[in-house]
Image (cartoon, helix red, strand yellow):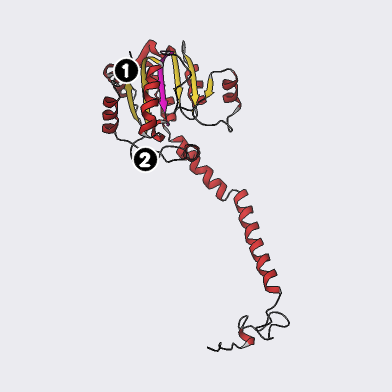
Amino acid sequence: MARRQVNPSRRLGDGGPLFSGSSHSKQKSSPLWPIALVLFLGALFLLAYTFTNRGGLGNIKGAITRVQGDDSCTMEVQRAIPILKKAYGDSMQKVLHIGPDTCSVVSELLKEDETEAWGVEPYDMEDADRNCKALVRKGIVRVSDVKFPLPYREKSFSLVIVSDTLDYLSPRYLNRTVPDLARVSADGLIMFTGYRGHQRSKVAEVSKFGRAAKWRSSSWWVKYFGQTNLEQNEAATKKFDQAATKMAYISSCQIFHLMPFH
């Protein structure tokens, strides 16, 4: 079928030809079109790059990270330290915290009288601040993959606190990790986990684990504790709840108090 002829004077718009030779036969397409296209795409790329580095997409991502990070269960641990002291008393003498931003929790715990604090960071610490790097150099905080046994002996710590970590583990790894946390505690294991349907972890944490958090209900955890022979510490739970009521503390995370393995 013969192709329909097009009026050359309309090929580049109603305003007439844009450059000399545009009214030639369409078999002789202008060599300036590829150049114009490259320049146009280059301008778009430069504009996007400038926007990103001047606070466009970069700042939006940063804002999301800060908001979600401030709403994390690790932040809840820091808020709950006075309540934990009321509930556990002398058991707060030697505490191990496991989770992202553990340096901040350890720093707060070290402010308490007669409290030793240690931390395990389950992610890389490329963005650690000076204070955190100092804790790492002293051996107080270490980086360790929690999917494998921790490098501590049984009952090395009076209390073990974990936050923003177990939500990312599949049941396969939970079966290894949670009993191991109870193994290194002498007086108990305290778990801070997210509620189902509530995003509480930083964007960076999701990418480092390579998967999104799986929010599990309290009934799911109770069933899991029974299957893994983990016993809830009813006495500590009652003391914690009483202290939380007196101090008007309401947690945005689920908190479970578990007995150590005997």
Q: Look at the image and tell me in which quarter the C terminus lies.
A: top left
Graded by Cα atoms within 10 Å as few (under 14), some (14 to 19) or many (20 or more), the crowding at tag 2 reads few
Which picture quadrant has residue 257? Answer: top left
Which residue range is magenta in the image? 155-164
Amino acid, disc 1: Met
Does 54 sit above or below residue 103? below
Residue found at the very far front of the displayed protein: 1
Please tell me how crowded label 1 is: few (under 14), some (14-19), or many (20+) other residues with Cα within 10 Å. Answer: some
Residue at x 44%, y 16% (from the top left corner) = 95
Residue 46 within the segment the image draws in magenta: no
- Drawn side of residue 183 relative to residue 129, left or right: left
Check if residue 163 falls in the magenta segment: yes
**Residue behind mark 1:** 259
Rendered image quadrant of residue 194 = top left
- Which dot, 2 or 1, sits closer to the camera? 1
Q: Work out which residue is located at the far right of the displayed protein and give it.
A: 20
Q: Earlier in the sequence, mark 2 or mark 1?
A: 2
Q: Could you tell me what secondary structure mostly forms the magenta stretch?
A: strand
Identify residue for label 2: 198
Give the image quarter of residue 45. bottom right
Q: Position of residue 244 (x, y in %)?
A: 32, 23
- Residue 74: x and y in percent read 44, 29
Residue at the spot x=27%, y=28% of the render? 222
